[in-house]
Amino acid sequence: MESIYNKSFDELVSYFESIGQKKFKATQVFEWLYIKRVKSFDEMSNIKKDIIDRLKEDFVIEDISLEKVERDIEVNKYLFTLNDNNHIESVLMRHDYGNSICISSQVGCNMGCRFCESGRLKKVRNLTAGEMVEQILKVEEDINERITHVVIMGIGEPFDNYDNFKRFVEIVNYQKGINIGSRHITVSTCGIIPKIREFSEFPYQVNLAISLHAPNNEIRDKLMPINKVYPIQDLIKEIRNYIKVTNRRVTFEYILLSGINDSESCANELCDLVKGLNCYINLIPYNETNNSGYKRSKKDTISNFYDIIKKRKINVTIRREFGSNISAACGQLRSKKEDL
Ligand code: SAH
C-alpha cells in the first residue's frame, strides 16, 4: 500500500476531491503528518471517523524502519529497512550552519563508478519519494532537532529516479510541511545529460552538483562508465546551458585518486574545461574502500592541485571530511545490512 508520505500536497488535495471530501482536509492531514508528526491516522482528532477509515484503507503512514544508528562526533549514520526488506543508509552531518542530511535515492546503483562502494550492489529498485521523505523524518525524530539542509548524495543516482526526486523536492519544500528551502537542497548526478536538461526547467531552486572526477574522456571513461554514454564535452555543454537557463552556480565534485587524476596537468586541464562557467570545484580526498584498489592522493598533492586551481581564479574548496570512522563518508554507503 502507498505511504501517505509519498503524496505531495497537491496530490493529497486531488485525493480528497476524488473521494468527495473538501480540499482543506489535505491541509489538516499535512499538519498532522509534518507539524505534529503523528504516526497513526487515529491521532488525527479533527478528522471524522469515516474519513480516517478511508485513509487507513488507502495509505500506510510508516513505511521504513530504523534498524541501526552509529554515532560519531559530528556524524550519525542510519541504516533503514524498507518494507520489502531492502536496506539503505542516510548520514546526518552537524555543521555550524545547521543539520544536514545525506539521503539515498535508490537501493543499489547501476552507474558502476569504479571508485564507489554504493554501486557494488546493482540497482534493485528506485526509492519512492515517500521513502526519501521518511529518511528525513526518522533522523529528525532521532536527534529531536530540525534538519535544515538536504543533499541527495547517498546510495543511488537521483537522475536515474528523476520523477520521484522531483516529487520528493515538492514534498519537503512545502511550506506548511517540512519546509526545507529549495536552496538548501542539493542534488548530485554522475552526468545524465537528458535529465540535466529537464532539471534546468524544474521550478525549484535546488542546487546541482556534478560528479566530474576527471578532466578528459580518457580518464573519465575508465572511472565512470556513464562517460561512454555522455562524454565530457557534451556534459560541459549541457551544464553551460543549465547555467544560462537558471542563472545558478554549479558544483563540480572531483575525487583525488593517487596517480590517476591528481597530476598538475590534470589540474590545468580541469581549469581549461570549466573556464568561464559559473561554478565551483569541490575537491574530495578519496575515501579508500576495500574493493576498489584506488589510493587517496597525498596531502601535498591535494594542496598543490588546489593551489593550481586557485591561481587560475576558479572557486575551489577541499571537502571537509566527515564520518570515515563509521564508514559514513562519501562512497562508503551500502545497501547491504550484512556488510555493516
Ligand atoms: N550518483 C550520484 C549521487 C551519489 S553522490 C553522483 O554520482 O553524483 C556521491 C558522491 O561521492 C559523488 O560525488 C561520488 O562520486 C563520491 N564518491 C563516491 N565514492 C567515493 C569515495 N570512495 N570517496 C570519496 N567520494 C566518493
Image (spheres, grey):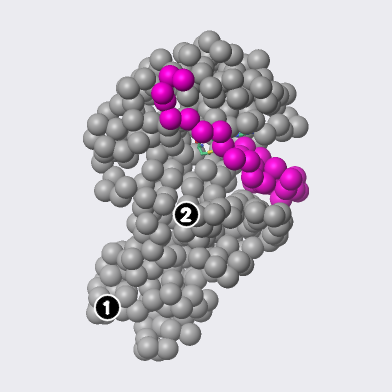
Disc 1: which residue? 24
User: Where 325 falls versus 50 (above or below)?
Assistant: above
Residue in the foreground of this view, choosing between 58 and 146: 146
Residue type beneath disc 1: Phe
Q: Residue at x 49, y 70 (%)?
A: 60
Quarter assignment of residue 196: top left
Q: Which residues are magenta?
A: 311-340
Q: Look at the numbered disc 2 and give the secondary structure of its residue.
A: strand
Q: Look at the numbered disc 1 and give the secondary structure of its residue.
A: helix
| Any part of residue 86 in sight | no
Marks 1 & 2, CB-CB < 8 Å contact: no
User: Where 72 falls versus 222 (above or below)?
Assistant: below
Residue type beneath disc 2: His
Q: Main secondary structure of the magenta part?
A: loop
| Any part of residue 184 in sight | yes
Disc 2: which residue? 149
Residue in the foreground of this view, choosing between 38 and 188: 188
Ligand 1 resides in the quarter of the picture at top right
